[in-house]
Image (cartoon, helix red, strand yellow):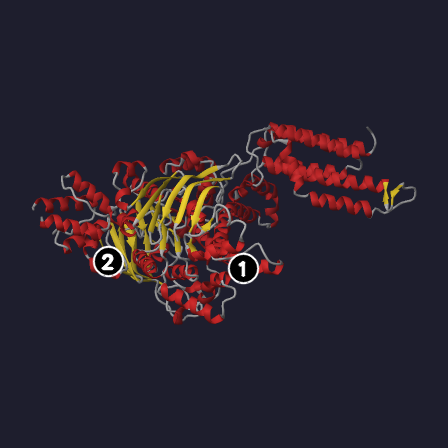
Amino acid sequence: MLRDLTFGQYYPTTSFVHKLDPRTKLLLLIAYITAVFVAGNFYGLAASLLFLLIAVAFSAVPLWSVLKSVKSILFLVLFTFLLNLFFYAKKEGDTTLFWVITKEGLISALFLASRLILLVMGSSVLTLTTTPVSLTDGIESLLKPLSYIKFPVHELALIMSIALRFIPTLAEETDRIIRAQKARGGDFDSGNVFKRLKALIPILIPLLVGAFRRADELGNAMDARCYSGSKNRTKYKKLKFTFRDLIAALFTAALIAGVILLNNGAI
Amino acid sequence: MQIVAEKLNFVYNKKTKFSVKALDEVSLTIEEGDFFGIIGHTGSGKSTFIQHLNALVPVQEGILKVGEYDLSSTAKKDKKALKKLRSKVGMVFQYPEYQLFEDTVFKDVAFGYSNFFPEATKEEKSKAVCEALRLVGLDPEEYAERSPFELSGGQKRRVAIAGVIVTRPEILVLDEPVAGLDPKGKRELMKLLHLLHEKECKTIIIVSHDMDEVAENCNKVAVFSEGKIVRMGTPKDVFSDAEEIKRLRLDMPLTGYLGQTLRENGFSFDFDLTEEDFIKKLQEIKRG
Amino acid sequence: MQAISFENVSYSYKQADAEYVRNAVDGVTLDIEEGKFIALLGANGSGKSTLAKLINGLLLPVSGEVKVFGKPTVGDDQNGLFEIRRRVGMVFQNPDNQQIASIVEDDIAFGPENIGIDREEIGRRIDRALKVTDMEAFRYSQVSRLSGGQKQRIAIAGALALEPDILILDESTSMLDPKGRKEVMEVARSLNREKGMTVINITHYMDEAAEADEIYLLKEGKLVKSGTPDEVFSDTATIRECGLELPRPAMLAEKLKAAGIISNVKITSKEELAEEICKSLRKN
């Protein structure tokens, strides 16, 4: 249902990975992405895959859910694969399989496609095990140092959390408006692109008007509860690193080290 | 047009772990000319049911006939028939003023008309729109060219209703039509609905939380609870069992409460739950 | 002590095209005593919501003076204004447009976070606010999954976390079903009775108004009548002029009197009405 959008892809259960601090998960994802990019050969990617599989195993999320995330970008993967396959810059000594396709080109295309798949799967482990709300908290906390150079960290986090809060509300409203206009004979799924875009006006305008009305009311509600920006503000929720986070960090460090060693052919 | 539903079942999110049974073997008949009230708590299935009536929610299981249209089979495939059905069954959602979008009242009211009758001439359209505005008590001369967004809440709601009745539906369904209005606005809107019932829409169906409103205005009532129809009949029948009404966590209309209290005090008399009939019957007793 | 006092207060919204400027609130003078349960009535557009926003300084009077516990709402005294907002909790009409955070406890924490309360104390305040509003079971729930009545109770809890002395319900029950309406009114009543909180209920429901200690009646920005429900509802003409109506039992009582069935019309509750009819029938 539409209202489940707030939870994004979140897979509600408790696990080692679920319980990690969102900041840890964000940082580890960055490390993992770096590893996938640094990996220069299939061994490096295999190490990353192994890491990913272990993470999935410790997250209690079915592997299928993680694989599903690839489905949505399958087209992109295929596109990347074909592009690399056909436009591989042929070098001296490459073995041609047929037409412009070379063995090296095929390998390179496979490599890039695998890299893409690994990246998407990694990110989906984060979103499957972390609610958007706690992700927002994590991002706010990680960006905190930037507030010293006058970067509006608090405001940014507030905007994100209000957006998250209102996604289900607006989704429901969109649904309602669509039904109402359909009842008045509105037709949203026939005709050419131009016609369809035009047909969206009866949905978009009420939605926009509604959003302004809501913003106005929310502003009043925030003022009434003494909102005055980040000045002298305290925070109820405090993120805490635990022993768990340390283990996860060490484990990721091992991955990076492994990939670098594999790149240099040391193993 | 008569509405006949037989054993309608509906499940949201079928085959997932979030599945919710919204309608459970719902059978009812709404006759042409009824002013039909639907009551029940939020989540009792009323809103799913009324959206079945113009195929906004498809029939999953069971039979639903609206006039000559059989929604259980044909409506889904035949777009033309579906459009015709929707022009005959007008649907006014809760807070319909939040669906206004055009820059003039005229254009907004015309939206439905143009969708349903794309071949109509300009004159026909203009005539239909002006008539719809007049029906809801807004003078077209004064309001047609104004922006709907600068009107008062009550006026906006009238414009929205005009936008639905502009196609002359035979059945008009309204989900909590008076919600959020002040007492005067409520009174005037109910008056308008009666006017429409007399002049235009043969059948009116309202979803309401106000038992007095239902007792006063509807000739028939259905009570929904957990997807089922648990009581149905005239207001008098439906509210005859005070214990049952209490068990369903519904309020008793004032006249129903008074009748029941009077009976408990040894005065037995029989009346429709309208205030008019209540007063009449009391006068009869008083005269002896 | 006077919780709220208005002295000849006027307010008008600035019109961009300045075609007509009518005072939304027009020369209102009133005193509301601490601990009272007040109903503020008036048709749509009569200035009720504007009046409510003047109380907690969301709007500042164009002329006249608004005082909350003796302190005037003045724009250039930011700290004073925040203290007034802390003491005057406000719940608005639309249950969907008041929560800032997605999770219930985070949302209730928003107010105390704003005024710099420390973490442990915020936790305690959340406990208390949830208890009073009977929403303890929903502490970790998603706001969007709650019913309308539950959302409004969370809005009340959010205001309570600032430990206010006055609670304003600005048509907070108008979008709720009867069940939600009962839940919210029960919470408001118990806050008034048990904690002595001053409650101002802006409403279109006359049965809610009939239960208040005092009623204030607004028409076109002006205060046209105030008094106990009995006093106000006995002035049928003024009620009608304001676009309002009597509570249902009183309305029916009037008709019954006109029809010669009962003679007493000073009736506000259905029990009184039933008794009156019985009495009259027994005389036969």
The location of residue B133, given as percent across then percent down, is: 39, 65
The location of residue B227, given as percent across then percent down, is: 41, 39
Which three-letter amino acid code belongs to the residue tagged 2? Ile
Residue at point 75% right, 32% down?
A: A46
Look at the picture and state if A25 lies above or below B156.
Answer: above
Write down the chain letter for disc 2: C
Left or right, residue C91 beside residue A235: left
Look at the picture and state if A263 lies above or below A91.
Answer: above
> Rounded to the nearest whole Å, what is the CA distance between mark 1 and mark 2?
43 Å
Which image quadrant: the C terminus of chain A?
Answer: top right
Q: Please state which of residues A192 and A236 is positioned toward the viewer in this rendering.
A: A192
Left or right, residue B104 beside residue A198: left
> Which secondary structure, mark 2?
helix
Q: Please state which of residues B159 and A10 is positioned toward the viewer in this rendering.
A: B159
Q: How many marks?
A: 2
Mark seen at residue A201:
1
The location of residue B109, given as percent across then percent down, is: 45, 63
Which three-letter amino acid code belongs to the residue tagged 1? Ile
Mark seen at residue C153:
none
Find residue A246 and report its image quarter.
top right
**Looking at the image, can residue B227 be seen?**
yes
**Looking at the image, can residue C149 be seen?**
no
Q: Please state which of residues A126 and C254 is positioned toward the viewer in this rendering.
A: C254
Residue that extends furthest to the left in the rendered view of this protein: C284
Residue carrying label 2: C239
Residue at point 47% right, 61% down?
A: B112
Residue at point 49% right, 63% down?
A: B117
Q: Residues within 10 Å of mark 2 (few under 14, many from 20)?
A: many
Left or right, residue C124 beside residue A248: left
